[in-house]
Amino acid sequence: MSTESITNNELSFSGTGLLRAALKLDAVLSGANGVAYLALAAPLADLFEVPAGFLRAVGAVLVVFAAAVWLTAAKERPARAAVLAIIVLNALWVVDSIVLLATGAYDPSATGSIWTGLQAAVVAGFAALQIKGRPAL
């Protein structure tokens, strides 16, 4: 295999390569967050000043989401419908995070508010990369 074919096929971050990389990163970080929320719900609830049950529920959803995103990314050509669903769910996460902060639904601590805002920004970045990579499908 020539260097050119490696560059063009395996290390490309344009088109489907960008999409799959963004999906895999989304899956890894979402899964890590989910596991942390499940395993450390009580101390994180104290730190963020939100209910531990809320963190456990979010953690469970994130673990399932992460598995679905990883399975989507594992395909050479991810299914359009699955990618669109992931983009929409990421967009909903961002909107929900903003609503949570704006309404004070759980009245998180400053640390919890910052964490929520940072997560929303990262998830928005994933969605943007996934949108950019999607037309290559």
Image: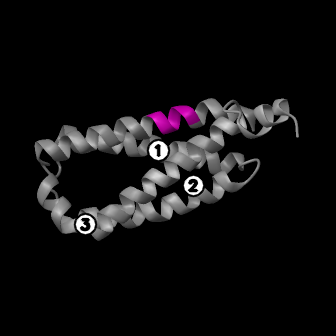
Q: Specify the label residue 90 is tagged with.
A: 1
Frontmost residue, 35 versus 61: 35
Highlighted range, magenta: 125-129
Where is residue 97? Give x, y as percent. 30, 43
- In the rendered image, residue 126 lying in the magenta stretch gets the answer yes
- How crowded pointer 2 is (Cα within 10 Å; few <14, some 14-19, many 20+) is rated as many
What residue is pinned by disc 2?
69
Left or right: residue 104 compared with residue 95: left
Magenta segment, prevailing SS (helix, strand or loop):
helix
Q: How many numbered marks, from 0 up?
A: 3
C-alpha span from label 1 to label 3: 23 Å
What residue sits 46% from the left and 34% below the top?
125
What residue is pinned by disc 3?
40
Amino acid type, residue under disc 2 in the picture: Val
C-alpha span from label 1 to label 2: 11 Å
Amino acid type, residue under disc 1 in the picture: Asn
- In the rendered image, residue 103 lying in the magenta stretch gets the answer no
State which mark lies toward you, 1 or 3.
3
